[in-house]
């Protein structure tokens, strides 16, 4: 009983205390309860998120495992295709990002737009101003011109032929470089090609390519260099000649040009072995050439067949005796001066014998002709005499007959 009374008293006290609690305490208690409820919910959410993440990780690992299994099953070509597809996707993503950046950049302020529109005008006007100032100054005409690639022609001649003057502007030389190049090629026979190159700030270099001197033509005044295009230069002195050179003694310019064109098709070693080229003066072959070689041999070959036949000389020269003559006019055979001299003597003897025979035959024919003419004359004279005798006889017979007739008349 006492315990029940005590519990009833404690409940009464609590109820009294509750009734005694102020409004603010009540709100505070409610706030704390809400806070605890929020904490509980937050923990639940975190737990839920953790579970979701673990679940996603498990799914990712399962997908990776499935991908790895699928990759193993895929062939090499399919892997390449997959890689290419991934690369294309990456490229597309990059392009999309670039487009986004460009769009962001395009959105400019009005001031930036105005500056952007005015920039070309400002740049061009500034350049024009700078160029005009430069042209007014003496530096616009100061230039250094050099020549490269020259071995036979002189640098001064090339610069002179180019037509470059001290008064020419640097800009005009840069813009009209082709005219200077054409001037050099047209005026200088030695120059095959020329190119004018500019180097900052005021340097110019003329790169020249010359024609090679293929041979020399012997004239009364000296030796004339012949270029690879067939052009002849002015006569040079003996001091200007190289140690070994090819001499061409042909009068026809057309033959010289065709010969030089043929040299371009022949082996250089073969051409270097030729010392002198002249005409062979053949009655049968008009374009037959006589080639005197450095080794002492002589080659006769037609100009029209020089590219076909002359290369055989390299194959047969080692087996030839010294000072041989290789005749390539009809076929290819080797001979010597002594053999040709004996052949020429035999021909001369045969000619003389033929001439002697002809003369003896003509004399005998003349004698026979004189004898026949004398016989004819004798027969004619005998015939004439016979005719005269017949006439005389007839006349005498007529006279005798007349006399006899007259005598008979007198007797009667």
Image (spheres, grey):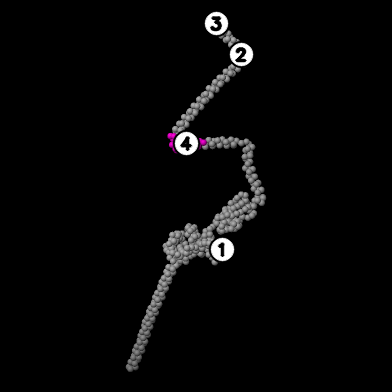
The image shows residue 14, relative to residue 262, as above or below, that is above
User: Pointers 3 and 4 in contact (CB under 8 A)?
Assistant: no
Q: Which residue is under mark 4?
A: 82
Disc 2 to disc 3, C-alpha distance: 30 Å
Q: What's drawn in magenta, residue-wise? A: 72-90
Disc 1 to disc 3, C-alpha distance: 158 Å
Mark 2 residue element: loop
Majority secondary structure of magenta residues: helix
Q: Is residue 378 something that shows in the picture? A: yes
Indicate which disc, 2 or 3, sits on the residue closer to the N terminus.
3
Q: Which residue is under mark 2?
A: 21
Q: Which residue is under mark 1?
A: 239
Residue 47 position in % (x across, y down): 52, 23
Residue 59 position in % (x across, y down): 48, 28
Indicate which disc, 1 or 2, sits on the residue closer to the N terminus.
2
Indicate which disc, 3 or 4, sits on the residue closer to the N terminus.
3
> Which dot, 1 or 4, sits closer to the camera?
1
Q: Quadrant of the C terminus?
A: bottom left
Disc 1 to disc 4, C-alpha distance: 79 Å
Q: Residues within 10 Å of mark 2 (few under 14, many from 20)?
A: few
Residue 65 position in % (x across, y down): 46, 31
Mark 4 residue element: helix
Residue placed most toward the observer, 320 or 178 = 320
The furthest residue to the bottom: 411
């Amino acid at each position: 009983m006492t315990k029940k009374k005590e519990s009833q008293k404690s409940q009464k006290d609590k109820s009294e205390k509750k009734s005694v609690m102020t409004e603010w305490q009540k709100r505070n208690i409610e706030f704390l309860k809400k806070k605890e409820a929020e904490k509980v919910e937050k923990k639940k959410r975190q737990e839920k998120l953790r579970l979701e993440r673990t679940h996603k990780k498990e799914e990712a690992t399962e997908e990776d495992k499935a991908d790895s299994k699928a990759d193993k099953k895929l062939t090499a070509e399919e892997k390449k295709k997959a890689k290419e597809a991934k690369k294309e996707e990456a490229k597309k993503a990059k392009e999309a990002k670039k487009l986004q950046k460009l769009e962001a950049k395009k959105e400019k302020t009005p001031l930036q737009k105005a500056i952007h529109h005015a920039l070309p005008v400002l740049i061009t006007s500034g350049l024009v101003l700078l160029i005009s100032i430069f042209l007014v100054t003496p530096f616009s005409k100061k230039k250094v011109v050099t020549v490269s690639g020259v071995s036979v022609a002189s640098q001064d001649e090339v610069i002179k032929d180019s037509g470059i003057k001290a008064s020419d502007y640097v800009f005009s030389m840069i813009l009209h470089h082709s005219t200077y190049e054409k001037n050099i090629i047209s005026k200088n026979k030695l120059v095959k090609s020329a190119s004018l190159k500019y180097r900052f700030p005021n340097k110019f270099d003329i790169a020249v390519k010359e024609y090679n001197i293929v041979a020399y033509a012997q004239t009364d005044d000296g030796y004339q260099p012949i270029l690879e295009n067939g052009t002849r230069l002015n006569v040079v002195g003996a001091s200007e000649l190289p140690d070994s050179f090819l001499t061409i003694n042909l009068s026809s310019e057309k033959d010289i040009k065709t010969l030089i064109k043929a040299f371009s098709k022949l082996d250089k070693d073969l051409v270097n072995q030729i010392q002198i080229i002249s005409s062979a003066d053949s009655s049968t072959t008009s374009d037959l050439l006589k080639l005197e070689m450095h080794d002492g041999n002589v080659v006769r070959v037609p100009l029209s067949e020089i590219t076909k036949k002359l290369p055989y000389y390299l194959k047969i020269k080692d087996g030839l005796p010294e000072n041989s003559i290789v005749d390539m006019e009809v076929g290819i055979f080797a001979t010597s001066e002594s053999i040709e001299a004996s052949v020429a003597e035999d021909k001369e003897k045969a000619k003389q014998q033929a001439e002697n025979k002809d003369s003896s035959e003509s004399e005998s024919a003349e004698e026979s002709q004189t004898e026949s003419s004398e016989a004819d004359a004798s027969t004619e004279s005998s015939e004439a005499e016979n005719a005269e005798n017949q006439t005389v006889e007839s006349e005498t017979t007529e006279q005798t007959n007349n006399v006899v007739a007259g005598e008979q008349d007198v007797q009667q």
